[in-house]
Image (spheres, rainbow, N blue to C red):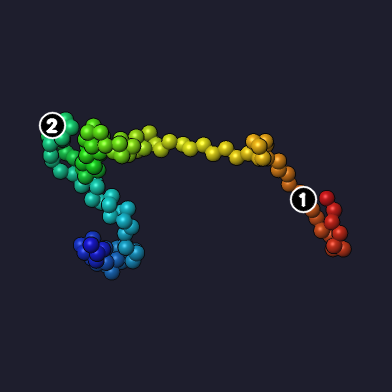
Amino acid sequence: MSRENGFDKDHKRASEAGKISKRPPSWKTIYEKYLQLEEEAINQLTGKQSKLSHRDWIAIDDIKKAREGDDRAKERIQNRTEGKAVQKTEVSGIDGEAIENHIVVEFVNDKNTVSK
């Protein structure tokens, strides 16, 4: 689907009127606009009527899939609620020894001799 539809046409009219910048909105901005929309519906997890955003529907769908045994849905939920697991990377020298480091500062004078 082209970004020339609806949203970008409105953006173009507003930018021509000097109300906003000429740059079209980012995909994140477009998605955020629609994810925040709410509607009255029956929550499939609680069975109660409530106001749900599209973001709520995505979360509910992931929870339902996780309860049915979908490992990817479980991983998505865990990553979003607890953060991705940290992967440690240990850096060491040869045979696990410490890495030696030092800084050498040298000054060159106008006679091209080096002093430390």
The quadrant in which the N terminus is found is: bottom left
Nearer to us in this view, 20 or 97: 97
Residue at which label 1 appears: 105
Residue 37 percent coordinates (x, y): 20, 47
Q: Which residue is mark 2?
A: 48
What amino acid does circle 1 point to? Val
Using the numbered discs, state the Cα–Cα distance from disc 1 to disc 2 in whole angstroms.
71 Å
Residue 47 lies, in percent from the top left, at 13, 31
Q: Nearer the viewer, residue 30 or 10?
A: 30
> Viewed as shown, does residue 18 lie left or right of 105?
left
Characterize the local packing of mark 1: few (<14), some (14-19) or many (20 or more) Cα atoms within 10 angstroms.
few
For the point 28% across and 69% down, the residue is 16
Q: Residue at 46% across / 36% down in the picture?
A: 86
Under mark 2, the amino acid is Lys
In the image, taking residue 88 as reference, residue 30 lies left or right, namely left
Q: Is residue 89 above or below residue 20?
A: above
